[in-house]
Amino acid sequence: MVITGTRKGIGAGLARYYSTRGYTVVGCSRTPSQSEGFVQIEADVSVEEDVRRLFALVRKRYGRLDALLNNAGIAGLNHALTTPASSLMRMLETNTLGTFLCCREGAKLMQRHKFGRIINFTTVAVPLRLAGEAAYAASKAAVESLTRVLAFEFAPLGITVNAVGPTPIDTDLLSGVTRDKLEALVARQALPRMGEIGDVANVVDFFLRPESDFVTGQVLYLGGV
């Protein structure tokens, strides 16, 4: 299993979770970091050569890839009128381009055994149309479209492609969001509470199950939005 963005937050939590459940986990992050129970590779998902090197390592060391979790992402909270182009480009490069590159290289490896599970990560900011997150929501809306199209392209290869959209989870990604804005966001959910790593893992577990081979091209949001 390859999980991107495992230096901290949801990615690190999922890497620890699956490494204790019998999976061989290879994580990656842009900067060097310590890992607990899984292999950690320094790689930037927005850099094509880094992504190719990551999956070449997986191929050489393990010979196959059964699951890919495209968790790596960056967010930004800013009104569109004051959002610089550089901020938008950083989000598109990491969230959208990075997901595309990892899907492409991961599928090349998965198709060898006619089996694979790809889970992309989106956000509830897309369906909630959150003001102040235009750039972030746009980059993740592209991920959702990518998920649905790749589900058709990869189906003949035995690969399913789905996406999960977490609600706010107490990670560094929310460090720039004020408490009152978080509370207002949570209040818009059918289940008004912050999310947890276990909530995300529960959805990923479902997509990973052998019995879920008839589930593809789906986007599942948490919390009821």
Image: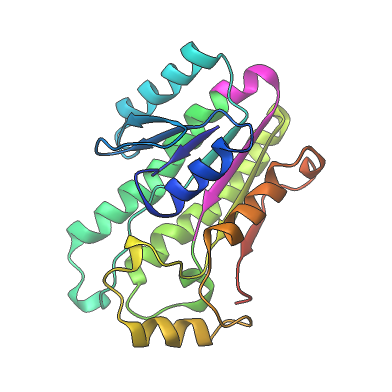
What residue do we see at 52% from left, 29% from top? 106
Instruction: Pinpoint residue 154: horizontal percent, then vertical percent.
Output: 64, 34
**Front residue (pair 125, 84):** 125
Q: Is residue 114 magenta?
A: yes
What residue do we see at 34% from left, 62% from top? 173
Q: Tell me which segment is drawn in magenta.
A: 109-122
22 shown above or below 113: below
Q: Quadrant of residue 211?
A: top right
What residue do we see at 70% from left, 23% from top? 114
What residue do we see at 57% from left, 81% from top? 189
Question: In screen coordinates, is 122 left or right of 46?
Answer: right
Quarter that holds the N terminus: top right
Instruction: Pinpoint residue 39: horizontal percent, then vertical percent.
Output: 42, 28
**Front residue (pair 16, 108):** 16
86 shown above or below 102: below
**Front residue (pair 50, 178):** 178
Q: Is residue 208 magenta?
A: no
Instruction: Pinpoint residue 52: horizontal percent, then vertical percent.
Output: 38, 24
